[in-house]
Image (cartoon, rainbow, N blue to C red):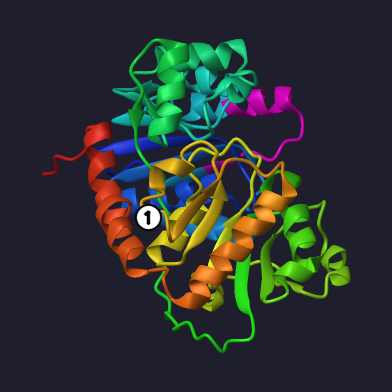
């Protein structure tokens, strides 16, 4: 039965796909949890759900109603979505929040009633990203009441293409509380790591190559995550790289980040604003990342937040990583400035207030 005891204010969150792990997935969890904690009734629809059982339990504890699609064929998923929309069509939502890409964004916006339709775009918005937009998705971007980008760079790309206003709102991220160890010149090896989806576009093969290079022998590389292309057995051949599997919870994530001296995101993916970098910033962890999407927007400190123009030249990547390690070992890389900047610009309580204004639910009785 549809639970609808307190329909105002209420939002419907629609997500096209929910993977087991990922930046968008972390944002959606944070979005739902923070909106619900503030007193908003949250209903969630996921068109194509691959979420883990623990994640599903979290959503069911957080949201008023949860509908998870698990059908393999896209046509069957749309039929399923139509029946879910018919079931909840009488609910007049304060706002519809959509996240993802594809024709289903347009589809759901025209089946349900909401005072405001806000679409949140999470990838880079550049020419390569725009080439993946089908006609109905681009139509949705033109017709939504508000289009929100995750970074200033992405917003600029989208404004130029769509010829409409595109606002900026960073994704929710976990504020990690970790023990900050001190760097010592006598430490035998620094720990550099990555966590997230294990796909080639995230630079996994490049991390493995770096771990084998004698010029980075004073760095030990660490990876957390999962992906079909990279089973645990794949990493056994790399003696200077440790694969740790996935986090079982936020405490494990905090512990992992606490052991690292730097975070690496050597990506060719059309990043919007990587949540992993925001989480690293929340813990004061220095990072080195490729200049994709909105990465440059959060590189406030050129010493502790460093950007590579690309990862196409291996020698340049190696030199950047080795130079980063040298500066960390010398003690010239600061953690404190990042923590302060995160708290001011990206912490959950700051974003919640901004989202409530955007969605028209900041006024409560």
The answer to whether any part of residue 159 appears in the image is yes
For label 1, the SS is loop
Residue 80 belongs to magenta span? yes
Badge 1 crowding class, 10 Å Cα cut-off, few under 14, some 14 to 19, many 20 or more, is some
How many numbered callouts?
1
- Residue 1 visible within the image: no
Quarter of the image where one finds residue 144? top left
Residue range of the region highlighted in magenta in the rendering? 67-81
Asked whether, in this view, residue 12 is left or right of residue 22, the answer is left
Instruction: Answer above or below: position of 311 versus 96.
Output: below
Q: Is residue 149 magenta?
A: no
Question: What's the residue at 31%, 38% (across, down)?
Answer: 10
Q: What residue is at 73 percent from the left and 68 percent from the top?
A: 215
Q: Position of residue 110 (x, y in %)?
A: 46, 15
| Residue at left offset 51%, top offset 47% | 274
Residue 70: percent from left, percent from top:
69, 40
Quadrant of the rendered image containing residue 188: bottom right
Q: Look at the image and tell me in which quarter the C terminus lies.
A: top left
Q: Residue 94, relative to residue 264: is it above or below?
A: above
Where in the figure is residue 61, as x and y percent of width and height?
44, 58
Residue 241 rendering spot, x and y as whole percentages: 75, 71
Q: Which residue is mark 1?
A: 301
- Residue 224 is left or right of residue 143, and the answer is right
């Amino acid at each position: 039965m549809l639970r609808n005891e307190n329909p105002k204010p209420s939002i419907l969150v629609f997500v096209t796909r929910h993977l087991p792990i990922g930046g968008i997935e972390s944002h959606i969890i944070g979005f739902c949890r923070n909106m619900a904690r503030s007193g908003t009734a949250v209903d969630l629809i996921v068109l194509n759900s691959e979420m883990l059982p623990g994640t599903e339990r979290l959503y069911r504890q957080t949201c008023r109603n949860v509908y998870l699609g698990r059908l393999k064929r896209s046509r069957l998923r749309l039929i399923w979505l139509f029946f879910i929309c018919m079931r909840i069509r009488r609910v007049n939502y304060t706002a519809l929040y959509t996240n993802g890409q594809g024709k289903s964004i347009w589809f759901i916006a025209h089946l349900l009633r909401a005072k405001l339709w806000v679409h949140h775009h999470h990838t880079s918005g550049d020419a390569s990203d725009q080439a993946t937009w089908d006609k109905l998705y681009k139509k949705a971007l033109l017709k939504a009441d508000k289009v929100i980008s995750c970074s200033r760079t992405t917003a600029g790309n989208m404004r130029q293409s769509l010829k409409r206003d595109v606002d900026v709102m960073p994704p929710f991220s976990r504020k990690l509380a970790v023990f900050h160890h001190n760097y010592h010149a006598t430490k035998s090896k620094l720990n550099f790591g990555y966590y997230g989806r294990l796909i080639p576009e995230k630079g996994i093969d490049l991390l493995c190559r770096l771990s084998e290079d004698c010029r980075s022998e004073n760095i030990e590389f660490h990876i957390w995550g999962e992906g079909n292309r990279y089973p645990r057995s794949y990493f056994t051949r790399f003696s200077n790289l440790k694969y740790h599997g996935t986090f079982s919870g936020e405490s494990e994530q905090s512990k992992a980040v606490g052991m690292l001296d730097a975070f690496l995101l050597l990506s060719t993916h059309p990043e919007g604003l990587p949540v992993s970098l925001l989480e690293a910033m929340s813990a004061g962890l220095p990072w080195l990342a490729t200049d994709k999407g909105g990465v440059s927007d959060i590189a406030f400190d050129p010493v502790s937040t460093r950007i590579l123009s690309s990862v196409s030249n291996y020698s340049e990547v190696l030199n950047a990583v080795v130079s980063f390690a040298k500066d960390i070992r010398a003690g010239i890389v600061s953690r404190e400035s990042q923590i302060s900047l995160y708290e001011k610009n990206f912490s959950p309580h700051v974003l919640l207030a901004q989202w409530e204004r955007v969605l028209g639910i900041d006024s409560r009785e």
